Amino acid sequence: MIILGIESSCDETAVAIYEGDLDTGQGRLISEQIASQIETHAKFGGVVPEVASREHLMALPPMVDALLSEASLNWSDIDHIAVTAGPGLLGALLVGTSYARAVGMVNDIPVLPIHHMEGHLLAPGLSDDLPEFPFITLLVSGGHTLLVQVKAIGQYEVIGQTLDDAAGECFDKSARLLGLPYPGGPEIALMAEGGNARRFKLPRPMLNRDNLDFSFSGLKTAVMYAVKNAGGLSAMNETDQRDMAACIEAAACEVLVKKSIRACLQKDAPRLVIAGGVAANQHLRSLLADLAEANGIEVHMPHPRHCTDNAAMIAYAAFQQINNGLPCSEAWDARPRWSLSNLNEPG
Ligand code: KG4
Ligand code: ZN
């Protein structure tokens, strides 16, 4: 079975072809393309929704044509089209879903609406077998910070989430305070290399509360005051900036990792997945690997390339749904807001 995946929920236009075998449940990624709009949005310090929609509209059709010809495939070879239907920016989602519906109708191919975060959550399966169910997933992206108990494909219970900013958003906003461009996560990670992570005292919000929720807006505010106390950005030299970046990375990652371990222990789940853009962070990955091992928890992480937005994860999630015989609703629409716990609620 050949699935064309399409992702356009935010600032990456991505397409991919995944081939899955329903007899074995195994598959492989045949080809993928990602066109980032980062350069366009960096000028504005964040994603401008209207600009994102326009760029998706220009990029998507030629990308799909190029992908098909690179894989030597015709439309008649495609069995399903999987498209991100939400959550995300409405205009950006509408470009992907309208295009998918149009080419699906013309070529008589069924279209499956996929939840963007389900794509992230299942992404470790692109490079390895998925862990045995049940497991806990930490989903950390620009818009979401979720702890999810995964009971089976399609059965996701959100057991913890951020009360304000997402972890990626905290990286992005803190980077801005350090004069670094958007997206801030990779910039902070780069700046943090060799920095002293103990120099500035930054809070670990919610760490001592006995729940599984997060809060990151206080951390961003603490960074703002730390920059002020250091005499402002203009008074900070490169060492100051490196130390500050290392402190931000250490604070955010410590909270994410310790709460994830707590979730595994509370739910008696010995397997943990991390996914989403922030899961590309090397400090987060190594801290998690260390603490998980110390607690007897097995960790699964997607390749860093498949942590940030991509269409391979969308095609793969569709394959998993089909392989597990999950029903697909005919009546669906792009959904900017969509809870992972209610995948089948009508849009
Ligand atoms: O999943 P994603 O690509 O898009 C959304 O669905 O939001 O996540 C993007 C977020 C951004 O906030 C970006 O700063 C963050 O992931 N990010 C990182 C790293 N790479 C991307 N944060 C920390 N370290 C990284 N290496
Ligand atoms: Zn994402």
Image (cartoon, rainbow, N blue to C red):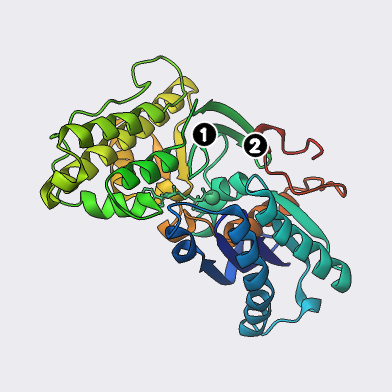
Element carrying mark 2: helix
Instruction: Look at the numbered discs 1 and 2 and tell me whether their residues touch, using CB distance below 8 Å.
Output: yes
Front in this rendered view, residue 256 or 176: 176
User: Label 1: which residue?
Assistant: 146
The relative height of residue 118 versus residue 319 in the rendered view (above or below) is: above
Categorize mark 2 by other alpha carbons within 10 Å: few (<14), some (14-19), many (20+).
Answer: many
Quarter of the picture containing the N terminus is: bottom right
The amino acid type of the residue labelled 2 equals: Leu
The relative height of residue 250 versus residue 313 in the rendered view (above or below) is: above
Element carrying mark 1: strand
How much space separates mark 1 and mark 2, taking CA atoms?
A: 10 Å
- Percent across and percent down for residue 101 are 81, 62
User: Label 2: which residue?
Assistant: 340
> Which of marks 2 and 1 precedes in the sequence?
1
The amino acid type of the residue labelled 1 equals: Leu
Q: Is residue 162 left or right of residue 342?
A: left
Front in this rendered view, residue 76 or 115: 115
Q: Is residue 206 left or right of residue 49?
A: left
